Image (cartoon, rainbow, N blue to C red):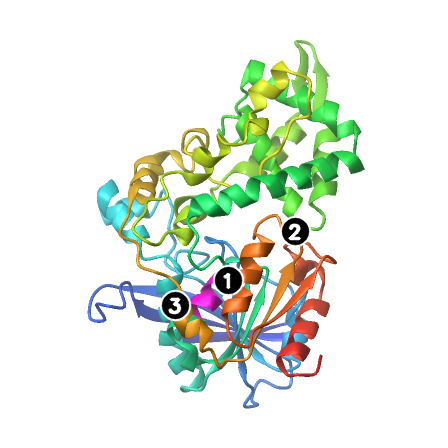
Amino acid sequence: MSAASYRQAGVVLTDRRFSVPLDHDVPDGERIELFAREAVAPGRAHENLPWLLYLQGGPGFGANRFSGPAAWLGRALKDYRVLLLDQRGTGASATVNRQTLPLRGDAEQQAAYVGHFRADSIVRDCEFIRREVTGGAPWTILGQSFGGFCAVRYLSSAPEGLETAIVTGGLPTLDGHADDVYRAAYPRVERKVRAHYARYPMDIERARDIAAYVLDHEPVLPNGYRLTVPAFQSLGIWLGAGDGSDRLHYLLEDAFVRTPGGRELSDAFCERVAGALSYRSHPLYALVHEAIYAQGGRATDWSAERVRGEFPQFDGEKTLAGGGPLLFTGETVHPWQFDSDPALRPLREVAQRVAARTDWAPLYDPTRLAANEVPAVAAVYHDDMYVDTEHALRTARTIRGLRPWVTNEFEHDGLRAGGPRVLDRLLAMARGEA
């Protein structure tokens, strides 16, 4: 492990790197390097503080790059030394993208490699480095979104490593197939879209107008992304965040400019859409998003795309031919994205093989969860667009002793948007103070 410390206002940071097995079942085999950033309050760097491990949402996103003790971090630093882990394949940890995957060989070999980047491997990474970081003492984990999925895997497979488990917006279904997840998701997304239009009724016409232009012209965005109607609809993923409706409204209000050749989508609009739609910074998300639900010998087989066919109201072209409002979509991955996005095109065959795979290992152990002894708490956001509330509460009931906090004050990003309040409440619950 190498370490280099430096300071920002209100925090002392230390960069750490760890060498772990690619396949923990083959400990003497290939190894990969993980990156994590330690954070501690100034003046406490030499204290023997308990550890809190933060597991970011995703999959496919590195840990937050904070500037000082922002959002929830300042609250955590009052009690803990914090480790912000880039999960394998994300951030600076064994990066997975179109540039690096060809090093693994052909598409079949690349898909096999990607299979090592789910929650089961991430938790074994955590246990591997915990012994080095804490000297063997258990630590507290804070799992946001997919990080919460990892936390439930942790409780299923290595609870002895945990002092406390804290989950925000991330209690997964324990046995549901990806199809079940998306059948529950599309109606939630529709509710979010209709709530957006109720708030910004002028956006009904604007969204239809933009979609009609896209259908007629199929423009290419500045980064080479081919914009289609389904791609435009996928901007609805913003509606799962606290400020997402406002962001979408501001994007739609100034989409067009007048040019000598007629009306066109503005450069500013296209630039913002390109940044929102591209997977260049997080391609692993597109590759394994459905695989995070894969268990029980069934392929995911592009679940979101198949299930969408059961909800014809999301068919954008049919909507444009009629008179209703265009429905945006949410947190889904589709095969057409591997044609539209230049960052994903080289990975199309890899993604197809991942989608066809059937031999995924089980992720959760309901029997062990029912016997849980680790103090556990979870923020469950009512009508969370990304994680089904009923699925989450069913899991909460399965995990012995877990205390859920169900709230409609926040959307899925409550841990970030709520500053210290969400973590403060959950810590109090875990300690029996609330």
263 above or below 134?
A: above
Q: Is the Cβ of the residue at disc 1 closer than 8 Å to that at disc 3?
A: no
As drawn, is 8 to the left or to the right of 89? right
Q: Position of residue 142 (x, y in %)?
A: 55, 70
| Tag 3: amino acid | Asp
Query: Who comes first in sequence, dot 3 or dot 2?
Result: 3
Tell me, yes or no, if residue 230 can be seen here.
yes
Evaluate whether residue 214 shows in this view: no
Number of residues whose C-alpha sits closer than 10 Å to that of mark 2, classed few (under 14), some (14–19) or many (20 or more): many
Magenta segment? 149-154
Q: In this view, does 202 lie to the left or right of 420?
A: right
Residue at image x 61%, y 29%? Answer: 270
Mark 3 and 2 residues: CB-CB less than 8 Å, in contact? no
- From the viewer's perspective, tell me whether residue 321 is left or right of residue 178: right
Determine which residue is flagged by label 3. Answer: 365
* Nearer the camera: disc 1 or disc 3: 3
From the image, state whether disc 2 or disc 1 is nearer to you: 2
- Asked if 115 appears above or below 151 in the picture, the reply is above
Along the line of sight, the residue nearer the viewer: 412 or 11: 412
Instruction: Report crowding for label 3: few under 14, some 14 to 19, many 20 or more residues within 10 A (C-alpha).
Output: some
Percent x, y for residue 82?
A: 55, 75
Quadrant the N terminus occupies: bottom left
Q: Name the residue under label 2.
A: 383
Which residue is under mark 1? 147
Is disc 2 in contact with disc 1, using a CB cutoff of under 8 Å?
A: no
Distance between the alpha carbons at the discs numbered 1 and 3: 17 Å
Which one is earlier in the sequence, the residue at label 1 or at label 3? 1
Give the alpha-carbon distance from disc 2 to disc 1, as whole Å. 19 Å
- For marks 2 and 1 on the same chain, the one whose residue lies earlier in the sequence: 1
